[in-house]
Amino acid sequence: MSDERIHNFQRDVSDIDLPSRFTYPFHYVPHELCKIAAGEIMDFALAQPEWHNTLNAGKMLGVLVVKDHDGIPGYLAAYSGNLEHSGNNNYFVPHVYNLLEPNGLFRKGETQISEINHRIEALEQSLELENLKSQYSDKQQFFAFEEQQLRAGMTEAKTQRHQLRASGTLTDEQEREITRQSQFQKAELKRMRRRHAQELENLEKHISVFTTDIDRLKHQRKVMSEALQQQLFELFVLHNARGENETVANIFYKNLHRMPPGGTGDCCAPKLLNYAFIHKLQPVCMAEFWVGKSPHGEVRHHGHFYPACRSKCLPLLQFMLQGLDVESNSLEEPHSNTTLPIVYDDEWITIIDKPAGMLTVPGKSSETTSVLDIVKKMFPQATGPMVVHRLDQATSGLVMIAKTKQVHKSLQSQFADRRISKVYLAMLNGIPSNKEGVIDLPLCPNPLDRPRQMVDHTHGKRASTEYRVLEIINGQALVEFHPLTGRTHQLRVHASHHQGLNCPIVGDMLYGIAANRLYLHAQSLVFSHPITSQTITVESRQSFP
């Protein structure tokens, strides 16, 4: 191939059928050609000693299988963000816009902002400002002590006045004298407070000379930074399969009416597709994969494939993929189910066995069938919200349905108070080091990549899971999970995170390796019946795994 950035497969791939449609980048199983190319890219990248530090620290790489002008398949490679010493290396496709160009807009703007940072730092670390703040703190402490001493004397004098008045021996002149004493002490306290306030105000004026300058410079920095970002995103020009082009800034403003987040346009997928469209290459399939250590808090495993991020890439790829025949989003495909298997039923409650891939409640797509849609038709006389709790779309198993508002409220209260016992079965990609235990890892949403969750020991909400290994099958562990809290993706993150079991659930496309399904199943529920008060135990009838 004439273009040195299009790489030939190192092995014969003529026996592998090309996909009929291009990859849906936010939910996919990587095509065999992508797996082969990813392995070759990883081998090449890890063989470059100058990239060791960056790759070992963790980096997302990407592959785009393409057909060249002669219809011959090859592949393009990309990295997300920057890669040290890679500027002159033609193995990877170039940046959409190179922020690190020595004389470019970013470098010039960065220099100006750095100058402001140095001025802010000089002011904040000024010896004069430090002395003024020290004086202010010392005076505050001394004034508080001085006032405390005066108030203590006033309290003692007041006690003495009470005692004298109680004795009944005070003359009128003595009464007037102790009254004058009380008034004098109160006035002295007011004078002292005014003096203290005046001295502190004088110091505050001197300090404000510095803080006003600092605040002004910080505002200037913010304005310059936002203006620079806006200018930069106007330089990120993306192309699509129709031959159209648009700036990253315009794509976000047209669709989301806001500025793109930092780093937008510098992920693997936009780089790969942009290069392909500019050079008239035909995209065949695409995948992104992680190399190196997992970032702090997030779940990334070396060599695993991951969907494109939504916060930065979703608006861009919606534009760039126009003109390509793209796979449908399997998460939005309608189900043919008109009924659901019932494992428990009475006048007030029904418990159904949800299949994997079905939403519990309706999502954004009106074409997607949910559990709620079906049970409304199954029980037309039922009232209230009906669905008591949710399972992830990819998770199968037991879901409780309440047929009255009162029962729904009672069951939800049991869930909130953790009085309902839930047991899940999962098949793990690996074997945990301990056969049983408790995982305590606080969770919160990943703000840059929803719906993914991340471990955050500062801002995360408590999440706790008991687990027990039941069986080892062909190097994979069948595990029983008992969640003690109910956070989003709790079991999936606790299984896959390196501080948890470090063994993703089989088929977990977000935190592990894609398969025919997510091997996570809500197996049993134990609860107190809201009407009869009986303890009810329900087991799923689906076979798992």
Image: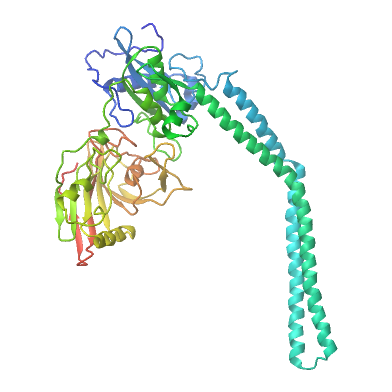
> Between residues 465 and 143, which one lies in front from this camera angle?
143
Tell me: 467 left or right of 79.
Answer: left
Q: Position of residue 16 (x, y in %)?
A: 23, 17
Image point 73% across, 90% down: which residue? 166
Q: Position of residue 323 (x, y in %)?
A: 32, 20
Asked if residue 482 is positioned above or below residue 367 in the image, the reply reads below
Looking at the image, can residue 14 be seen? yes
Image point 42% across, 50% down: which residue? 461
Tell me: 373 left or right of 136.
Answer: left
Asked if residue 338 is positioned above or below residue 23 in the image, the reply reads below
Q: Position of residue 273 (x, y in %)?
A: 38, 20
Location of the C terminus by quadrant is top left
Image point 79% across, 56% down: which residue? 199
Colour basis: rainbow
Q: Residue furthest bottom?
A: 168
> Between residues 343 and 264, which one lies in front from this camera angle?
264
Asked if residue 132 is positioned above or below residue 502 in the image, the reply reads below
Q: Residue furthest right?
A: 173
Tell me: 388 left or right of 210.
Answer: left
Location of the N terminus by quadrant is top left
Tell me: 48 left or right of 543.
Answer: right
